[in-house]
Amino acid sequence: NDQPAPRVTVIGTGYLGATHAVCMAIMGFDVLGVDVDQRKIDMLSAGKVPFFEPGLPEKLEEALASGRLRFSTDFDEAASFGDVHFVCVGTPQAPDSSAADLRYVDAAFTALATRIDRKALLVGKSTVPIGTAARITTMVQSISPLGAELELAWNPEFLREGFAVQDTLFPDRLVFGVSSDWAEQQLRRVFEPILDLDTPLIVADLATSELVKVAANSFLATKISFINAMAEICEATGADVNHLAKALSLDDRIGGRFLKPGLGFGGGCLPKDIRAFKHRAEELGVGQAVSFLGEVDSINNRRRVRTVDLIRELAGGSLAGVRVAALGAAFKPNSDDVRDAPALDVARLLYLEGAIVSVYDPEANANAHRAYPDLNYVGSMAEAVDKADVVALLTEWSEFRNADPDTLGALVSHRRILDGRHALNANDYTSKGWQYRALGRPA
Ligand code: UGA
């Protein structure tokens, strides 16, 4: 192929977009990252990642040094620069319903379609309700000076926070949703370095590629809620969900990943994706097919309430005036993301019941403080557990997993610990005089 390599623009420089832009440049493409947020663009241009993601700062530096990556807020520049334009903007839950809010997606495609004046491919990467790509195709072609010449494709992204670079450079699979051979060829060219690694590729229509993404996240959420539902049964029967999960996981048809019981799932993806999927299926008249996702959501939310119950039990029946050390606020370790975070939700519920809560997270304190300014945030684990009546491990950061029960015990008022993530060795604690409780395990 003697054509010049396609130039790539990435619209939206959040988690997904910033990582995608950096990785595309690392793979050898000329890349322009675009965002409406001047602050983000300034930070990224200066080599600073606006969020916590292990490994990304180093890759950003490498990409900037290569001269292949630039950032801008200018959509005219984006339109003239790119041959392939990736749209990576957010699709949060709408403020007043369980549906996805598509205003940023629509705005990004509109901004591009009204400006692009030569044949180019627009690629959606955001997680969207099924049918969005078809709707946007019609919209784009009606507002573009090129009309039907401007093509759309969908390329869902499966990266996990905390593993964003690795998941982008070495994905399990690639999915191309296309409506023409030309679109498929364009995508093959920009993903050539990954396809060369023998990464499995599924080429599908637009609707299937949209569905792959929400189906994958729904399956993962269902798996977590399944084991957490079993934890509820364990609590009623005196069984131990840890042993149960272990026994199930050894059947390799079931597998152990995403079968870890505890406080459940949170974050900017799983919770809102299952809600938006259920909402969309109802709109399509097939709500019954995924009505179980409502149960998946309820089971997940009940874990938070149950965690508060166990902390109350540990405290002797009432939370009023009880000092609780909340260890963790992020929705999972190695992240500073507190969107729909089970940990922060538990801290908030404790506070509402009159507990005196000290929250410490190694990376997420600032974001948590913005989300819930009422809670008391402290700068270290030692400060959080100081004179605590109950310690609650809510996000399984290694700093908490590796803590020494005696060192902690010297700081607290009462040696009582709730392990919300099955992250600790119960014997290590009970042998040092701690009262230890965990979801789905006998007292
Ligand atoms: C998730 C998916 O794993 C990605 O494949 C997907 O691309 C991404 O959403 C997205 O849609 O963008 P992420 O939200 O980064 O990725 O986080 P996960 O690692 O999937 O964890 C989700 C939540 O599940 C966390 O709160 C975690 O603590 C919880 N979890 C995970 C469990 O409670 N038990 C488990 O066994 C596994």
Image (spheres, grey):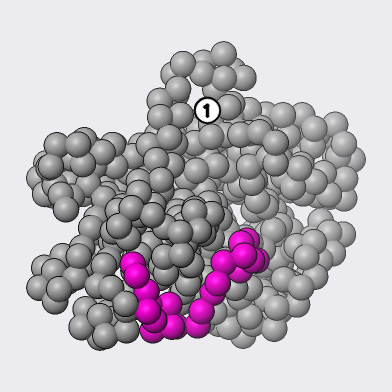
Q: Residue furthest top?
A: 285
Q: Position of residue 400 (x, y in %)?
A: 32, 74
Q: Residue at x 62, y 65 (%)?
A: 374
Which image quarter holds the N terminus? bottom right
Q: Determine the image quadrant of residue 134.
A: top right
Q: Give the amino acid type for the residue marked by disc 1 in the picture.
A: Lys
Residue nearest the observer in this picture, 436 or 194:
436
Residue closer to the observer: 97 or 103: 97
Residue 373 part of the magenta-drawn span:
yes
Q: Callout 1: few (<14), some (14-19), or many (20+) C-alpha neighbours within 10 Å?
A: many
Query: Vertical placement of 121 versus 11: above or below?
Result: above
Magenta-colored span: 369-390
In screen coordinates, is 247 left or right of 357? left
- Disc 1 element: helix
| Residue 44, position as x, y percentages in the image | 68, 76
Which residue: 64% across, 66% down?
Answer: 373
Image coords of residue 190 (percent x, y)? 57, 56
Of residue 251 and residue 158, the one placed in the foreground of this image is: 251
The residue tagged 1 is: 278
Q: Is residue 25 left or right of residue 441?
A: right
Q: Is residue 189 visible?
A: yes
Residue at the spot 19% in from the left edge and 70% down from the top edge: 434
**Nearer to me, 321 or 237:** 321
